[in-house]
Amino acid sequence: EGGGLNNGSVVHVSNYPKNATAVHAVTIKEIVKGDSDLDTEPIAEDVWLALEFQRPAYWDDLVMSEYISSIMEHMPLQAVEMIDVATTLNKFAKNLDGVSLKKYNHIISFHKKSILSLDGNNRYVTFVRFYNNEFKWKPNKNYVCQEDSKAYGKMWHKEGVFFKDLPPVLKKAFLNREIIHSVHSGLSVEKVH
């Protein structure tokens, strides 16, 4: 029944006869690692990053590093928009057109995913790639960590640093950062194009 966003972190729900939207505050840890306390898998593993709704090119490592800086500097982060295709098919299928039914069934049966990303592909790719040590974060040379008041920017602004080499305080800051997810159910493909 639905994807991996059913962890109780709902901050708003709107229900209408033909669709529903839930707004979740989700940590990056839940996205890349899952949550052992809640016995959930990483949300990123359940999300289909469809290119038809977004620009096809992914961010390069420099832009990803700048986004990690936004996370570490506690800047406001744009919400991620998704469709819970599993819930849409389970609860709202009678309201969908044939194109949407075919698309959503394909996502579940072929891609083995239950959530469709409408806006957030680059952010999801950035979270996963940084957590998996696939690129280095190069903070601004004036970056000072709010949690421990250390000037990590002076240490890493030239060479950068992989996630695995961060001190525990920065790993925790990254993994515990919340990003808002607006998760829609019951929307047709036509309504999101």
Image: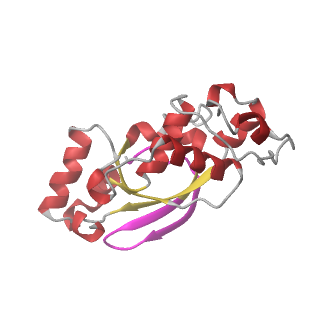
Q: Position of residue 66 (x, y in %)?
A: 59, 49
**Residue 5 seen anywhere in this rendered image of the structure:** no
Q: Which residue occupies the extreme bottom position in the image? A: 16
| 109 within the magenta span | no
Could you say which is closer to the camera, residue 54 or residue 105?
A: 54
Could you tell whether 158 is left or right of 154 in the image? left
**Colouring of the image:** secondary structure
Q: Residue at x 41, y 50 (%)?
A: 121
Q: Which residue occupies the extreme left position in the image? A: 98
Q: Which residue occupies the extreme front position in the image? A: 158
Q: Position of residue 19 (x, y in %)?
A: 34, 68
Q: Residue 36's quadrant in the figure?
A: top right
Q: Residue 4's quadrant in the figure?
A: top left
Q: Is residue 46 above or below residue 36?
A: below
Q: Is residue 25 above or below residue 159?
A: below
Highlighted magenta segment, given as a residue range: 2-23
Q: Residue at x 53, y 41 (%)?
A: 127
Could you say which is closer to the camera, residue 21 or residue 165?
A: 165
Q: Which residue occupies the extreme right position in the image? A: 149
Could you say which is closer to the camera, residue 25 or residue 135?
A: 135
Q: Residue at x 53, y 33 (%)?
A: 135
Q: Position of residue 98 (x, y in %)?
A: 12, 61
Could you tell whether 32 is left or right of 116 in the image? right
